[in-house]
Each structure stands twice: as structure tokens, then as C-alpha cells.
Image (cartoon, helix red, strand yellow):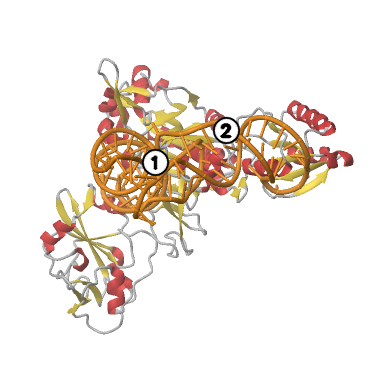
Amino acid sequence: MRFSKAFIPTLKENPADAEIPSHQLMIRSGMIRQLAAGIYSELPFGWRSAKKAMQIVREEMDRIGAQELFLPSLNPIEVWEETGRAAGFGDELFRLEDRKGRGMCLAPTHEEIICDIARGFIKSYRDLPQIWYQLQTKMRDEPRPRSGVLRGRQFIMKDSYSLDIDQAGLDKSYELHSQAYHRIFERCGLEFFVVGASSGLMGGTGSQEFMVASEHGEDRVALCPGCGYAANLEVAASRAIPIADPDEGDSEIEKVSTPDTRTIEEVSKFLKVKPERLIKTLVIISEEKPVMLLIAGDDDLEEAKLQGVLGAPFRPAHPEEIEELFGCEAGFLGPVNAPQMPIIADSRIMGGKHRITGANENHFHITGVEVGRHFKPDQAANLRAARSGEGCPNCQETLRVTNAIEIGHIFKLGTKYSSAMGAKFLDANGKEQPIIMGSYGIGIARIIACAIESNHDKDGIIWPLSLTPYEIVLIGINMKEAEVSIQTEALYADLLNQGFDVLFDDRDLRPGFKFKDADLLGIPYQIVISPKTIAEDKVEFKQRNSGARQVIKLEEALQIIRG
RNA sequence: CGGGGCGUAGCGCAGCCCGGUAGCGCGUCUGCUUUGGGAGCAGAAAGUCGUCGGUUCAAAUCCGGCCGCCCCGACCA
């Protein structure tokens, strides 16, 4: 492509709306343009990269025997009512009506459509297993689109669906996907790791997420550098550091005045004790009943874990509800002499002595509390979020907690959708069985954004070879000079003939301008031709990743490019 | 949905507090000069000041409603 004819609208300044590097650079390099919140057009430069990612995905999916198909984005709402997910997705589902008033929606994913096809055609165990995949736009009315393309309302996903006759078959399909995903993300040059995840609302028996560490990720994960343990913080275990209680003999409760100290930090400072020796009392409402939660003062509640313990939805109690139940503010709650309600304590506080809690009276706390003597939790459970520096549950190393971006997710679904929709087959014994399903997603834009998040510098993008929109940018310096024009034109034609993806910067612009654009676009190899290099019968060769710049024979440069 | 910020030329912003001719930088167009890290000079085009209403002789500026966008939180296959 000639830059003079290309539509690559680069920007010198950062757009005001973009905060994270990938978003800024995708806009500055003319890859994307925002149309509305969470909705982006893919411009030619960005689309070339997206197509490369999709090609890698296609090759690896085909390799495990998956078959690509293409499904409707416009769906009748009834299909989604069959599985209850019309309600499940709620406001996140884009809804509309056709001219006859029939309820429609824009597909946020496609399990239901796959089930509909399966129930129409899959009749026998002989028809299975199957793996079907699609690379398509999905639409979700996200409550808060953000971070550029990382969380959009319209986005391209590779989604695949496995159909099997039994659990062993599902295990195999799941394993095939795991292998394919490893190859895909390796080929994309991403430093990823796999974490055990909660299955969430998708249901099913197992799931893993493929993550890339990034400070701008929305997920938090615990990683062990020793044994490779990796888990979403939603489920991560850890060996918590024990709380040291003072050796002061019997723990006897004493009410102390703590005026205007409502937070852990304030109480800790006022009473001059470490936050960990305070017991934090939280009140939640689950199934319309209050439940008291107790965790160490320096710990954070991990809501996904609590969700697992309760087995029911919950919400924090409102301040008015707390006033009504306890007769005091939320800042002075405690389990001693508290109103009757179930108490769930985090395991880390169990056995503690000389602890401090609220007195259930404004401006008072209680010291010298002994867990199990002055109050008895109904249940001890792991409610706290694991933290950096705590012990790995599987080995002696310490965990590191980091933010991460989810680029892929694999699920063992089981029969949730096939049962609801009557997608059944006859097994070898002539018995009707629901199809066992798996579902496996990859976010294409997230691959691109992650690649940029982890490969850029102050000047711009640094593309991995597998995803770069062009492999070589050929820069002519002083294009008005006949000799430069002749040489670059000849080289451009030659490089194209050799099968390289080349962006030929034939624009009549000052050198600095072209260099800045080349670095911003992040194309791995820059070849510069100028009157100087022509005189020496050499080219200037720059590798974007190292910044190394050398004046060498063209053949040497091509040698390096060919690897 | 709760909290915060913003909306003025294609992009980045000032002007608003204290009402009175709409400005700066970048980009764009023309000409000349330039040509190794986003050039210089001269000239030019381009803005319903998000939108609707109110106050006023007069509103980008003051008041109110609405819409949109960004950030934090809640939510999230």
C-alpha cells in the first residue's frame, strides 16, 4: 500500500476521551474511530490487524476439527425465553421489535441458536461429537462501556460450541480447545496465563480463563511464580498471614469510648492497634434476611466467595436498615450483644483473642474480644480476597496479585441449554439424552488491545510480527529526487513480489514527519532510502522493537526480515 | 444505577466566575522557501458555542430540563 493513497488518519495529539495506552494508540494510529459509547468502526489499518488475529484463530480452530459457520445476529426473543436468558441478561440484551411488533433482540452470544440448530439436525449419537465456531459481532448493552475496545457494546468474538454424547466427550472437546487457545495466544505473541474461574451465570461444571497481566485489566488474579498456581481472585486461595494477638492472659471485654471513629483506619489509629486486630462487621441482606459477616480489619470481602457460601444473591444492607436493626451507625457494629441473625466469620479471625469490635452503640467499641467465647459464629468460611505476599496454597512460594485482561474463556456447560431447549439425541441403547455442551470464547479486539498494551513505548505501537498490519514500512526520503523515487519504486515492487506486506511511505513530507508516523504505527521493520544511502548502495534498516538502526546492504536487511 | 468531570472549527484547548464583535495551537487549502525526528513565511476556508426552554435591550457566559461522552464504583457470558 502506498501511504499517499492509504486511509491511515494518524494523530499527533492524544484524544481527550482515551486514557489507557491501547485506546490512545489505536486512535492515534488511525485503527479505529468511535461512533458511540462502546461502539467503534474498524478503519483499514486496524482491520488488517484484526484480520490477522482472526486468521490465526481460524487456523487453530480448524486444526482441532472445528467447523466455521455464521449465525444470525438478529434473533427472535422467544429463543432466548426458552432458556430464561432473556430475563437473565436483562437490560444487557438489546431489544427491538420488527414491523409486525414481534419481539426481537440482538444476539449477545449464541448458545441458544446453536441449540436450535442442534435440535433440528442432531438425532443420533452417530452425529456427535461436533465443534462449531463462528467469528462474529456480538451485542451487549453494557452498563458501562470503557477502556476503548476492551469493553465495548459491539465486539467481534470467536465463539465455539462443542456437542458431545457424554462427559468424557466434553472433557476431550474442552481439552482440544485448551490446546488450541494456547497455540492461538502464543502465536499472537501474548504473555498469557490460565486461571481457574467461577462459572458465573453461564452455569456448568468447569471453566478457565486465559488472561494477560495488565494494570488496565478489569479482573484481578493471584499468581504463584513457583508452581504456576493461578486463579481469579474470585476463587483464589492463599495461606493468610496469621494475626498476632498479644500475650496478655485472659481476654476480657471492655467497652471503650471511641468518639467519631467509624472506619477501620480511624479506630486503628485512635486505639493504637494494628488494623488486623480489629474485626470488621458487615451486614448484608440475602433472601430478605440480614446476615452478619466478620472479617479481619485489614482484609477485603471477596463477594464471589460469599456468593458461593450463601448460594443466593445478596446486597449490602442500607444505612437505614442497619440503624433499625442495631440502633447505631454502621461504623460501630460488632457481633457481641448483637441482634439475632446468622453470623458468618472469615476463617482468618477464628481463635482470635484481644480483638476489637464495635459496641453496637455510637462512639463506642469493645476491646478484649475472644472469638468463640464472647460470640459464636454460626459458620466459618473463606470470605476474604487473597493478597500479594501471602503464601501459595500449593507450594512454599508467595503469591502475586495482579490486574489482568481476559482474552479467552472456556466453559464446560453440560446440559443447561440443551435440556431447556430439547436438544437431544438417541444413544447407543436407543435412549434419549440431552446433548452435553461446551462453549469457548475469544475476544478479537481484546487480543489486539492486549498486544498493544504490552508492546508499546512513548513513540507508539510495537507490533508483534503475527499481528502487524504491515511487516515493512518503506520510507523514501526526499521523494522529489528522481533517484530516490526510482529506487524506492523499484524496491517497493520487489518487496511486494517477494510476498511481504509493505506500506510504502511515498509521501512528499519531511523526514521527521515520516519517522514519527512509522514509529507510531509500529510496523516491525523500517527500510529507509535517501540520497545518502543510495550513494553508499545501502539502505537504512530499523527494527521497531529494539530501536536498533543500521546502514547495511539491502540483502542483509531482507535476511534479517526473513528471520 | 450512585459519585465525579466534560461538551466552543477535523483534533487539542482558552474564553464562562464578572453577559456586549468567538479566540489560540495543531491540522486543512493556496503560494514561496525548506527536507534526517511531527519546518518557516504570507494568505485563506472552516464554528447552529451539545440541545430545548427561561432571565435580559443583549446569553458561549446566568438559571432550569434533556441528550451525549469520559472516569471511579455497582454490574459483567
Out of B53 and A107, give the one closest to the viewer. Answer: B53
- Residue for point 30% across, 74% down: A268
Which is nearer the N-term, disc 2 or disc 1? 2
Vertical comparison of A479 with B5: above or below: above
Write down the chain letter for disc 1: A
Q: Residue A497's quadrant in the figure? A: top right
Label 1: which residue?
A: A145
Q: Which mark is residue A56?
A: 2
Write down the chain letter for disc 2: A
- Secondary structure state at the residue bearing disc 2: helix
The quadrant of the image that shows the C terminus of chain A is top right
Judged left or right of residue A115, residue A483 is right
Residue A215 at least partly seen: yes
Foreground label between 2 and 1: 1
Q: Amino acid at mark 1?
A: Pro
- Residue for point 82% across, 29% down: A486
Q: Residue A2 at what x, y percent from top left? A: 69, 29
The quadrant of the image that shows the N terminus of chain A is top right
- Secondary structure state at the residue bearing disc 1: loop
Circle 2 residues within 10 Å: few <14, some 14–19, many ≥20? some
